[in-house]
Image (spheres, rainbow, N blue to C red):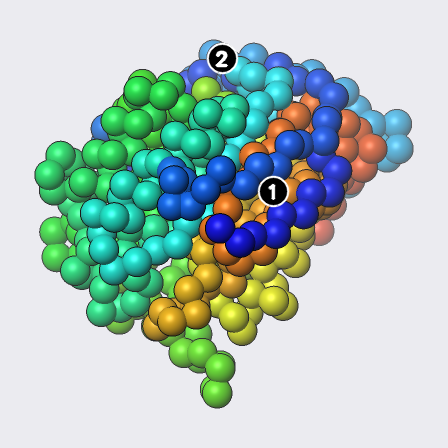
Amino acid sequence: MKSAISSLISSRNFNLHRSSLSFSIFRRPSLLLPSQFPVISTDDKATGANFTSLRRKCRFHSNKSSPIMASSFNPEQARSPPALPLPIPPVTKFKIGLCQLMVTPDKQRNIEHARKAIEEAVEKGAQLVVLPEIWNGPYSNDSFPVYAEDIEAGGDASPSTAMLSEVSRRLKVTIVGGSIAERSGDKLYNACCIFGTDGKLKAKHRKIHLFDIDIPGKITFIESKTLTAGQTPTVVDTEVGRIGIGICYDIRFQELAMIYAARGAHLICYPGAFNMTTGPLHWELLQRARAADNQLYLATCSPARDDGAGYVAWGHSTLVGPFGEVLATTEHDEAIIIAEIDYSLIELRRTNLPLLKQKRGDLYQLVDVERLKSE
């Protein structure tokens, strides 16, 4: 497999599942290509967290006031409800695996290919593995109904998620399962499933912002012709910290990332398939902006580029740190990126730049509608 990897320094699903959510110093990640390709290798009905209970049960970092600026501008009022303190994660450091996979029209082949990629990533030390957007079939409005699965039914009705459940349980790994087309009644969704180390479905995110664009002479795609928009943001507590989930076009809407930060996310994962028009201009830009603005980690995972496909993906799966720095990335071929996440950098960067304490609650406010209704 030909691939170039560069490394810089190293629910209805508003699900905040309880965990004993610990923090340390950052190290250069080891980035690994798969040894060879193709050798590359549930409970969605879980109730949303009660935020009052969450505050009572979880341990949080102390929130000392910054000497740089007084709180006369009511920074806590810039978020409604006020932002949750960053929870203590269950691990200080861990490795993430981003599996940039070639997708074909052969669904069974795609499932087995993804299984082998996950196995290889775990063999290389990954405790969290992320798959691409629409990894089990072609990305097209014609294909969505054909490849769609009934995730809630599971089993033979959803062979893609059955594989994710089995491999997460067998390898004791947390999986952000990219996305697949989901069939629910007479509706189709672009859905991402998150599996814990016990193989259980911890959360499911349905793409909130549908990809409806028209750039004359370049690209036109209208997801809403076949897909229905999701209705809830998704934040889930996992064995590797609190993770916010978005899918591709969701990354363009900074309000969603801001809500995730205010809900205490350490990391946001965006499985995504940017195209050859917007990818070169916006893919890395948006990732770095979301990470820097919210001072947290951000990971993306794209399909590998297939120049013969109807929709050609940009690739360039990436991990970005809380200072907006690219920690690990790749080009457009198949690759597995293995990189280290060190959550102590979040606290460090938020001390270096105390943005949370410098917001102007007297001038503006972001309202988390769902959380506000729950309190």
Which residue corresponds to the image point at 53% horizontal and 15% vertical from the top-left? 90
Residue farthest along the right direction in this orientation: 68
Which residue corresponds to the image point at 36% horizontal and 21% vertical from the top-left? 171
Considering only order in the chain, which callout, 1 or 2, is on the residue closer to the N terminus? 2
Q: Nearer the viewer, residue 198 or 251?
A: 198
Q: Nearer the viewer, residue 334 or 324?
A: 334
Residue farthest along the bottom direction in this orientation: 217
Q: CA distance from mark 2 to mark 1?
A: 25 Å
Q: Residues within 10 Å of mark 1 (few under 14, many from 20)?
A: many
Residue 22: x, y in percent? 62, 15
Query: Seen in the image, is 318 located left or right of residue 151?
Result: right
Q: Is residue 358 above or below residue 181?
A: above
Quadrant in which the C terminus appears: top left
Which residue corresponds to the image point at 71% horizontal and 35% vertical from the top-left? 10
Q: Nearer the viewer, residue 355 or 341?
A: 341
| Mark sitting on residue 20 | 2
Q: Is residue 76 above or below residue 200?
A: below
**Marks 2 and 1: CB-CB under 8 Å?**
no
What residue sits right under mark 1 in the picture?
319
Residue 210 makes an appearance in the image = yes
Instruction: Indicate the secondary structure of the residue bearing disc 1.
Output: strand
Q: Is residue 263 above or below residue 140?
A: above
Residue 15 makes an appearance in the image = no
Q: Nearer the viewer, residue 59 or 223?
A: 223
Residue 71: x, y in percent? 79, 33
Residue 9: x, y in percent? 75, 38
- The amino acid pointed to by label 2 is Ser
- The amino acid pointed to by label 1 is Leu
Q: Is residue 315 above or below residue 311?
A: above
Query: Seen in the image, is 78 located left or right of residue 21?
Result: right
